[in-house]
Amino acid sequence: MTDTTHTTQAPDDADILLSVRGLSKQFLTGSGPVKAVEDISFDVRRGQIVGIVGESGSGKTTAGRCLLRLVEPSSGKAIFDGVDLFSLPEKALRAYRRRLQIIFQDPYSSLNPRMRVRDIIGEAIDTHGLAKGAARQARIEELLTRVGLSPEHASRYPNEFSGGQRQRVGIARALAVEPELIIADEPVSALDVSVQAQVLNLIQELQRELGLTMIFISHDLTVVEYLCDEIVVLYLGRIMEQGPARSVYAKPRHPYTRALLATAPVPDPNVRRERVILQGDIPSPLDPPSGCVFRTRCPHAIAACAETVPTRETVGPGHSVACIRQAELAETYQD
Amino acid sequence: MAMSTPNADNHPDALADDIVLRAEDLRTHFIMGTRTAKSVDGVTLTVRRGQTLAVVGESGSGKSVTSLSIMRLLSHPGRIVGGRLLYRMRDGGVVDLATLSDKRMRAIRGKEIAMIFQEPMTSLNPLYTVGDQIMEMIRLHEPISRHEARIRARRMLELVEIPAPDKRLDQYPHEMSGGMRQRVMIALALACNPALLIADEPTTALDVTIQAQILDLMRRLQREIGMSILFVTHNLGVVAEIAHEVAVMYAGRVVEQAPVHDLFARPRHPYTKGLLACIPDAKRDRAEDGTRKMLNPIPGSVPSVLALPAGCAYAPRCPLAEAHCESVPPDLLNASPEHLTRCWRHELL
Amino acid sequence: MAAASAPSVDTPRISTLILQRKTLAIGLAIIVAITLLAVLAPLIAPYSPSKLSIVNRLKPPSSTWFFGTDEFGRDVFSRTIYAGQLSLLVGAAATALAATVGITLGLVAGFFRKADGIVSRIIDAMMAFPDILLAIALVAALGPSLATVIIALGVVYAPRLARVVRASTLVIRELPYVEAARALGVPTWRIMTRHVLRNLVSPILVQATFIFAYAMLAEAGLSFLGVGVSPEIPTWGTMIAAGRQYVGQADWMTIFPGFAIILTVLSLQLVGDGLRDLLDPRLRKDL
Ligand SMILES: Nc1ncnc2c1ncn2[C@@H]1O[C@H](COP(=O)(O)OP(=O)(O)OP(=O)(O)O)[C@@H](O)[C@H]1O
Ligand SMILES: Nc1ncnc2c1ncn2[C@@H]1O[C@H](COP(=O)(O)OP(=O)(O)O)[C@@H](O)[C@H]1O
Ligand code: SF4
Ligand code: SF4
Ligand SMILES: [Mg+2]
Ligand SMILES: [Mg+2]
């Protein structure tokens, strides 16, 4: 098994819609540079849902915003359907804006409070000149129906909706331009479980019926396990582990992934899990640890971990891990 | 309000010995002109000595209003309009918090009952060091010197496992991470050794690895100190980890209370059952070959507290609802001696 | 967590909300009355504002001349309501100019990092000077006339609005709904108007009301100091300036136009405060 994920060349697998290579983003802040995302590479196949998981500050949102060029990446490539999004000039980028869309976490601040739903969705249609007059009206109604709202909702303002309904409006806005890839940044994190289930079902229906490809950003490992085909685990801006969701959940190989899975609360009082409680806090991204960034909290850290930045090693089909001790630790992880 | 000695409020057979707090048909409304938000409208729950009662419910179900009612910290125009809040003081006397004078309530807050909030940043004063805040709290209730208070404060930080406590005492809240601030909040709440701790979503704003640390800490402290905890959360996973008993809230009422194992093994209210069914679970919701099954969401949405249905508030969404449910609000019924449910048709579950 | 009960909010009418806030209602009523008096001056004024009558110089208020007469025997009442036309015009025009310049500068500074450095520095520099000094310098440089007074006051008050707009723009442009618009490819100018400006209507309105009041005061100040509108043109400012020499002898020449200014400025402040309460974000849900 050859590992394609480290090569800087984009693989010429026709199935791959988006191929991210060496994406890094540094923010210059008052207290120094913050490496929000550091050298991340992964592929997104057509029709798949790729989950990006990690705790807050791990760089999930920044990675997503870079892919959409909502912030300018510091380096790297993002080959979308053969074209590097990061080297597109602003003008050419506009055409690609139609093909990639985003859904936001906060259903409250992601809709302009002064615009009616009709205008929020209409703006997307108008920007790309997709429909006019009666056709535009019909399209708006169709989109609202599609996301489980009714056409009468078109003339309402966002504050007249519940969180779940607002999230549906945000989804309708993204769908209005018929995108191929949707980046969903924690789209259900702000919702109650019963509403979350409704929105997750909607996302799946859309993905199936419209053949959408998705990057699903979340910190909820339960949701990701259920929803995603592939998963990418981030910590302090670096990829710790990546692979098919089933393989990563069945055999997590990175100490961080194992800790995350062990601490995610499960709604079953009979589950008495081996609890790997990580000590301490996530270090400041202003001053990340040398070598392996996880070493300050890793229960298996040794002196060598401070020296080398672990490279990603392949441990199974499409499954790779960045830990220098992964091979020896693998033996202790029998289950 | 008439001043009364603890014994005068004593309702001898109102509280069993092992019960610290019992809310009986608590009703707290927000009266805004012509509109009334019945945020809490019939909450009955019981917190047992040395145990954790988790109060779980979706947003707006009245969890925070219940907590604030117990603490009597309701902001205008919120008011307790009915029901009793029987609390057993450390000296054994029973008082009704719902009608206690403000003066006596002040003596109870912090010393008998303490509270921690969801957002540790906004509930700590940004202008004072954490040491000052803990010391002030202690000295408010106990006549001790600053020096002694500082020693106590330092011990509290050690208790909540804050590394380098001497250094941390002199730091300001903004110099700490979210998890560290929540530990400080816990230290602050426990400074006067309360018998009951009310924790309103203390881990909701935290990452899972930090949440695990805080839950672990609270469990350890409960074992060591023996306090009772009323733990508010919307996360059933957290409930499973921390609770001895669970009270499920829906639209301002407790619709079910039961020991945690009973509740998860056999929920006796359709709402609880619906909630458990809609949390994704890859083992249940994905087939062998990995294909996903659709989730089973509860249809519809939570009713507005401004216009609650006349009968069972869950009836519009309930698969078992019948005509009777829509007209008569269900009583709190015993599904088993320890398992209470507000559902006319609980035998069907 | 999602509140599922949103659609049940009652939406009271704007007019009810205004009436509920007494200060706002009173302020608005006075402003409307003053404006009507000024606009309808030709119908209301008993005399022509420029009709000289040497015999009737410096007559005290009476039933013939409600506010008395001035040193040329002109009716002070008629002049006061006529003067309202120009005073209000100066205030309104200066506010409109300040709004145009200020909003543009604020949006540009808030949106474009590069421009922000320069624009912010200009704003800070201008706000470091007392308003009236800056206005005097500008009028002196441009030569006094009605137009230059308006321009000078517009320029002087523009930074106040620019500052408000810039600060809010910086916040709003980071909000997810603006990101969503950018992700859709909506052009920047449309984002500026549809997403940013539309959400700034309330703070701008509040500031503009205050600027209107300041500008009217400043106009009077300039006239009083003799660097404003030419003394022949009746504004409340020029009237007070002319009456200054007769203080003690014919106080009515200064008292009545002075009272007109104070009343207008006060009621504008009432309106501004009232609007601020009305549009306060904590109460906005009611709108
Ligand atoms: N000050 C207030 N004025 C009017 N209504 C209020 C006020 N505070 C709370 N409410 C209403 O009371 C109901 C219960 O609110 P509460 O804060 O207890 O919910 P919760 O269960 O804690 O929800 P969350 O999970 O979002 O914290 C809500 O419908 C809320 O809108
Ligand atoms: N505009 C910004 N300026 C400076 N630092 C930023 C900015 N946006 C994000 N960061 C920093 O980058 C890191 C990653 O943030 P983010 O991508 O939001 O993480 P996540 O979405 O995983 O919570 C954090 O340390 C955050 O503070
Ligand atoms: S490289 Fe070392 S510190 Fe990093 S995860 Fe592996 S064992 Fe832990
Ligand atoms: S009382 Fe009726 S409507 Fe209410 S939960 Fe039970 S079965 Fe459903
Ligand atoms: Mg994020
Ligand atoms: Mg709450």
Image (cartoon, rainbow, N blue to C red):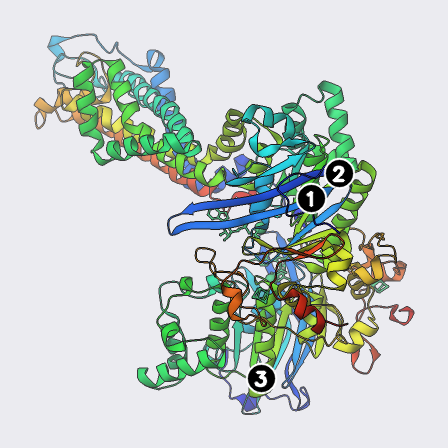
Q: Residue at x 64, y 25 (%)?
A: A95
Q: Is residue B55 left or right of residue C156?
A: right
Q: Quadrant of ligand 4?
A: bottom right
A273 up-or-down from A143: above or below? below
Q: Residue at x 63, y 86 (%)?
A: B49
Residue C2 shows in the view: no
Which residue in the structure is indicated by mark 2?
Answer: A13
Q: Chain of mark 1?
A: A
Using the image as rendered, state which of residue A266 and residue A117 is in the foreground.
A266
Q: CA distance from mark 1 to mark 2?
A: 10 Å
Marks 1, 2 in one chain: yes
Using the image as rendered, state which of residue C255 and residue C111 is in the foreground.
C111
Which residue in the structure is indicated by mark 3?
Answer: B227
Q: CA distance from mark 1 to mark 3?
A: 51 Å
Q: Quadrant of residue B271?
A: bottom right
**Around disc 2, counting alpha carbons within 10 Å, would you say few (fewer than 14), some (14 to 19), or many (20 or more)?**
few
Please tell me the numbered disc located at residue A43.
Answer: 1
Given contact means CB atoms under 8 Å apart, are the residues at marks 1 and 2 in contact?
yes
Using the image as rendered, state which of residue A319 and residue C131 is in the foreground.
A319
**Amino acid under disc 1:** Asp
Residue A116 placed where, x, y %? 63, 33
Residue C194 shows in the view: yes
At numbered mark 3, what does the secondary structure look like: helix, strand or loop?
loop
